[in-house]
Image (spheres, rainbow, N blue to C red):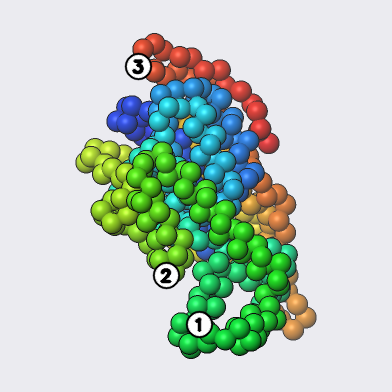
């Protein structure tokens, strides 16, 4: 829990001579979460309490999410610090990789991985699958379909290619295809601007973007520390033994709380439940968390079967008041700063 993590956050701040801000989006099966715009106000709350400083280290665990929100987070963090560091204990995929590209350096453990940044679109016009849910349209999947026709099947005449494209529009709305092209151009431009914080060579920037957007071959491809540093040329830092122990300790404690690897099963719940799906924490700002809360009601049917009803009562951000102290003091290397505890954005 947060109160046990505070000591680890403080020690990690000393190790990196920075202010630690921890952002976690859970990938727990059936109770996962993603980077989303609704977290921005909470980032502002924590950063206002931290105040302008020399260096901020973002402790990040995520499988991805909204690309615009990821860029917004980077831009916001940079307004409060001269140097931005991202610490990746395990996963920083998709939009998490976008955030990492915007840092001056990325600290990766030996098990940490980044991933491709080719976007998958989720719009109201997306195709629907059998259960009625929307099927994500991958930018690279559309590109792969067209390239397969041209390169593998050797179809080159305009009439046949037009027919193949029309077949595609039978399954994917033309406006979604237009958004696919726009999103690819947008994410390449975004990555190019963010990378300038850690890579200055234009050729290296192009190589990194080409790989992350296309050449990796699959959105599920994972990039370890060695590949990120030696093959892509990102500014990767290996933590010291003491730093690794602190990073691993924080990750293990968060994993114990959010239970990444344990699927949430309604059939195993009887009564009220509350599941934390995101965390945003700092020493001076306390702990904010996104939660889903509800009640599982069971009833016997006439045929002897058991009916299970899940009633979700609340889904949104809350502030962990158990983390609040009236005043928290930390040092900035020159003098002690005392932060007053506010109540902005609390539910």
Q: Determine whether the residue tagged by mark 3 lies in a helix, strand or loop.
A: loop
Callout in the foreground (3, 2):
2
Residue 99 in percent (x, y) is at 47, 45
Residue 177 in percent (x, y) is at 65, 68
Q: Determine whether the residue tagged by mark 1 lies in a helix, strand or loop.
A: helix
Specify which label sits upstream in the sequence, 2 or 1: 1
- Which residue is more in the foreground, 271 or 75? 75
Is 311 placed above or below 20 here?
A: below
Instruction: Please name the residue that numbered disc 2 is placed on.
Output: 217
Instruction: Please name the residue that numbered disc 3 is placed on.
Output: 333
Q: Determine whether the residue tagged by mark 2 lies in a helix, strand or loop.
A: loop
The C terminus, quarter of image:
top right
Callout in the foreground (3, 1):
1
Q: Can you tell which quarter of the image residue 133 is in?
A: bottom right
Specify which label sits upstream in the sequence, 3 or 1: 1
Instruction: Please name the residue that numbered disc 1 is placed on.
Output: 150
Residue 142 got which mark? none
Res 202 visible = yes
Count of number-bearing discs: 3
Residue found 54% across the figure and 78% down from its top? 146
Asked whether, in this view, residue 226 is left or right of residue 152, the answer is left
Specify which label sits upstream in the sequence, 3 or 2: 2
Res 309 visible = no
Callout 1: few (<14), some (14-19), or many (20+) C-alpha neighbours within 10 Å? some
Is 22 placed above or below 139 here?
A: above
Residue found 50% across the figure and 27% down from its top? 80
| Alpha carbons under labels 3 and 1: distance apart | 61 Å
Residue 198 in percent (x, y) is at 37, 40
Residue found 50% across the figure and 78% down from its top? 147
- Which residue is more in the foreground, 171 or 160? 160
Asked whether, in this view, residue 147 is left or right of residue 123, the answer is left
Q: Can you tell which quarter of the image residue 214 is in?
A: bottom left
């Amino acid at each position: 829990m947060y109160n046990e993590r505070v000591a680890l956050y403080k020690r990690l701040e000393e190790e990196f001579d920075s202010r630690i801000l921890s952002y976690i989006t859970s990938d727990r099966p059936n109770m996962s979460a993603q980077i989303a715009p609704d977290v921005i106000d909470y980032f502002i709350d924590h950063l206002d309490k931290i105040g302008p400083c020399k260096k901020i280290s973002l402790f990040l665990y995520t499988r991805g999410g909204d690309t615009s929100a990821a860029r917004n987070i980077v831009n916001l963090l940079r307004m409060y610090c001269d140097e931005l560091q991202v610490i990746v204990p395990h996963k920083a995929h998709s939009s998490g990789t976008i955030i990492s590209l915007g840092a001056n350096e990325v600290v990766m453990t030996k098990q940490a991985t980044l991933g491709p940044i080719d976007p998958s679109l989720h719009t109201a016009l997306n195709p629907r699958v059998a259960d009625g849910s929307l099927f994500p349209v991958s930018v690279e999947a559309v590109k792969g379909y067209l390239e397969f026709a041209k390169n593998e099947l050797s179809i080159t005449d305009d009439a046949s290619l037009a027919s193949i494209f029309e077949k595609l529009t039978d399954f994917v709305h033309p406006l979604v295809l237009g958004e696919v092209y726009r999103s690819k151009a947008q994410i390449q431009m975004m990555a190019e601007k963010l990378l300038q914080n850690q890579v200055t060579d234009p050729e290296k920037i192009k190589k990194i973007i080409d790989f992350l957007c296309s050449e990796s071959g699959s959105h599920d491809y994972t990039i370890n520390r060695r590949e990120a540093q030696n093959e892509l040329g990102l500014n990767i830092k290996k933590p010291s033994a003491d730093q690794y122990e602190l990073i691993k300790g924080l990750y293990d404690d968060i994993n114990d709380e959010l239970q990444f690897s344990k699927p949430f099963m309604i059939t195993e719940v009887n009564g009220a439940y509350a599941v934390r799906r995101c965390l945003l924490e700092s020493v001076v700002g306390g702990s904010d968390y996104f939660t889903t809360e509800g009640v599982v009601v069971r009833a016997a049917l006439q045929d002897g079967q058991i009916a299970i009803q899940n009633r979700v009562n609340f889904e949104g951000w809350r502030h962990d008041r158990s983390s609040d102290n009236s005043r928290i003091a930390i040092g900035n290397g020159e003098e002690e700063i005392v932060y007053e505890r506010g109540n902005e954005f609390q539910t």
